[in-house]
Amino acid sequence: MFPAPLLPLLVLALLNPLDPPDPEAGKQVPQWQVLHFERDGEKQQETVRYQLFLPSFFEKGEPLPLMLFLHGAGERGEDLDKVKQWGPPRFLPERPDFPFIVISPQCPKGQWWDLVVLTALIDQIERTYAIDSDRIVVTGLSMGGYGSWGLAAASPGRFAAIAPVCGGGDPETADSLVGIPVWNFHGSADNVVPEQRSLEMVAAIVAAGGERVKHTSYAGVGHDSWKRAYSGDRLWYWLLAQRRGAVADPLISEERLSQAGENRPQIERALASGSADQRKAMHWLVQQMPLTDLTSLDSEYLLENARLALEARRGDTPAGSKPSRMRSSSTRYCRMPPSTSAATAGELTSVNDSCRWWQNRCRLPKRPPH
């Protein structure tokens, strides 16, 4: 039998082995480390426990976007597996190709998210891994929704976007949040954190001049709107498309997206992928293409069209030539006039300048059905 004074130390040792498991591409693994930081001019340190996910295509030195996920009050404590109850940590073991490095810290029992510690954790991850600093995003649920709003307001120049779920914030910080893309979620029947907390934040940002905030309300849903918000891939594609300091992409109306029917996920993925110029081209295409294309073409096919047209416009392909990867000798190669200035969606024209790209069916041959 162990002496009573040693029992707490034994429990702590069992919960915190000396060395965490090595990170591995395509897997989510528990991690813990001592962070050193300053608070109000005083040097401090704190041990932080978190789940770390590296995508299956992770390669050392290749910058990747970073997602910080903040759990709710029910997952606080010392059992790091509790963090995997909801949100990205729940599904990441089944999604080895999820396109973010994801860190999911655990808040100690009885505490609230400490913004200074969270900032120090992001700093440490950036020192350890190649992170695309223009693509750091934050999402969180309930207490983590509050943490998402608070962290963005405290460091508005650091994040590409935030996606708070059933949380709230301080409307007085709205001026700091005007330039950050926000997609907020809440259930209309939430009696734990009323939806009004979210609506106040959205209204304050709009009143301060913000144009990049949107709110999704789930009718009749209580304090578990994260189940809806984190289902499917729409939110992840949107977050993946955001860049710190980027100009907002053109908006596609809900009516137009709904016309895609069951093909909507493919259209949304194409709209959220590629370079800024490709996304501008894609927005134009989605507005102009016939319904038969809107309801049938996959995202890879659409992105290839946008990429080839932009290559031609920049002069990467000689006028009138057709890339070898095009599979039909009868297909005209779509390009834009070399005299045109920087690419915008409205400038896409076909090789003979007399028709628009999709309107005249000037495009790559369709991929045969699987």
Image (cartoon, helix red, strand yellow):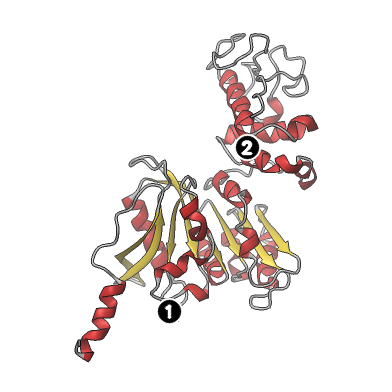
Circle on res. 92: none
> What residue is rendered at 60% in x and 49% in y?
233
Under mark 1, the amino acid is: Lys
Q: Residue furthest bottom?
A: 4
Quadrant location, the N terminus: bottom left
> What residue is rendered at 52% in x and 48% in y?
244
Nearest to N terminus: mark 1 or mark 2: 1
In the picture of the structure, the residue carrying the numbered disc 2 is 270
Residue at mark 1 to residue at mark 2: CA–CA distance:
42 Å
Q: Is residue 62 above or below residue 193?
A: above
Q: Is 76 displayed left or right of 351 in the figure?
A: left
Q: Residues within 10 Å of mark 2 (few under 14, many from 20)?
A: many
Under mark 2, the amino acid is: Ala
Residue in front for this viewpoint, 100 or 263: 263
Residue in front for this viewpoint, 63 or 72: 72
Q: Is residue 271 above or below residue 357?
A: below
Q: Position of residue 142 (x, y in %)?
A: 58, 70
- Dot 1 falls on a residue whose secondary structure is loop
Q: Position of residue 182 (x, y in %)?
A: 61, 56
In the picture of the structure, the residue carrying the numbered disc 1 is 109
Q: Is residue 342 visible?
A: no
- Dot 2 falls on a residue whose secondary structure is helix
Q: Is 221 displayed left or right of 61 in the figure?
A: right
The part of the image, by quadrant, that contains residue 255 is top right
Q: Is residue 160 visible?
A: yes
Quadrant location, the C terminus: top right
Q: Residues within 10 Å of mark 1 (few under 14, many from 20)?
A: few
> What residue is rendered at 77% in x and 19% in y?
360
Q: Is residue 177 above or below residue 169?
A: above
